[in-house]
Amino acid sequence: MQFRTKICRRTLLSAMVAGVTLATAPAFAEVKQINIANQYSMAHLPLMVMKDQGFVEKRLKAQGLDDTTVNWLNLAGSSAMMDGLLSGGLQVASTGTSGFAILWDRTRGQVKAIGAQTYMPTILVTRDPDVKSPKDLTDKNRIAVPAVGTSPQAIFLKMAALELYGKDKVNHFDKMTVTMAHPDAYAAMLSGAGGVDTHFSPPPFPQWEIERVPGARIILNSDDLTGGPATTTVVMANEKFRADSPKAFAAVSAGLRDAIDYINAHPKEAAEIYLRALKNTKDSVEETAALITAPGTTFTYVPKNTVKLFDAMYDVGVLKRKPNDWKELFFPELHDVNGN
């Protein structure tokens, strides 16, 4: 399988800003370019579909913004997304719900979610024969996560530590984690290189690892920590983008709904888009479509159990405050749905 090379975050954000006037555009002017960042796992499929099908561009045209362009970037992990939104280099970013929670907390609600994308279990897989459960992980193990400390996987490990060892040891697994994009972690699990023997990821990577890595097995499911399915990924933006460019913001919001409706109506075509996005010529469209429609996986812009997840993050000390209602976390354009 061939994957895109991970881009240096600092170089990438500098390149985004260079020659682009959005950050300094007058407050009354709609942006002329929308920078949207996405990630690699299937949990971020809606933005891959948005890009492939040109849904944002179509909505921009309907808003009379024919000359507004959309610039798509791939980043690994929520830290890069945070930096991009805070610097103004990004207008829209796709990230795990926990990474979004940290940014919402840090900005006191200036960053909100445009909508949910999916809920699917995040799975901890190991190839270490001595590890039968998270309790067996030691300092010699290396757990690949998209971003140490801030990614959903890093937060889930804190929640697991709280459950296993108590509040004083919520950081028990931190020293075992390493930052690595999911495709790179999957390749490391296959090859045994880089010292990575454990990978915490959403589909399709756990399924591929269990099938292809000798002795690989599941030792933790995020649903066990959250008491059931919870929104896995969201699309987020800064309040400033919505205030300064309401038409462009509306185009992105509508484009997200278009993409999720497309996935649910056309899972085979969505699978083809996903495989193309990863330059994956090994896995079949049929197998990938089966993962998209698998029990426990749902693509929806409606938030599910987000407040419950934020509460858990507050309990482990990751957040300094928590919401009273899910509508505090999402822009008003989504308030017509029955979220939680």
Image: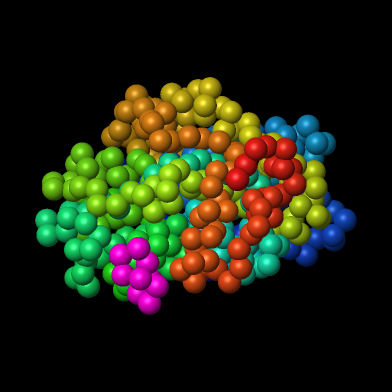
In this rendering, the answer to whether 224 lies above or below 254 is below
Q: Quadrant of the N terminus?
A: top left
Question: Is residue 169 located in the magenta-colored stretch of the structure?
Answer: yes
Report the front residue among 235 and 164: 164
In this rendering, the answer to whether 224 lies above or below 238 is above
Task: Identify which residue is drawn at 29% across, 62% down.
Answer: 143
Task: Identify which residue is drawn at 69% across, 50% down.
Answer: 327
* Residue 206 visible in the shown view: yes
Image position, residue 22 (x, y; %): 74, 59
Report the front residue among 66 and 92: 92
Image position, residue 90 (x, y; %): 63, 58
Task: Identify which residue is drawn at 51% across, 55% down.
Answer: 309
* Residue 81 visible in the shown view: no
Q: Which residue is situated farthest in the bottom direction here?
A: 168
In this rendering, the answer to whether 322 lies above or below 226 is below
Image position, residue 142 (x, y; %): 25, 65
**Over which residues does the magenta segment extend?**
162-170
Report the front residue among 225 and 137: 225
Asked if residue 140 lies left or right of residue 115, the reply is left
Q: Which residue is situated farthest in the right direction here?
A: 28
Question: Is residue 127 located in the magenta-colored stretch of the structure?
Answer: no
**Helix, strand or loop for the magenta stretch, by majority:** helix
Asked if residue 338 lies left or right of residue 118, the reply is right
Quarter residue 60 falls in: top right
Report the front residue among 91 and 334: 334
Task: Identify which residue is drawn at 42% across, 32% down.
Answer: 292
Q: Quadrant of the C terminus?
A: top right
Image position, residue 129 (x, y; %): 11, 56
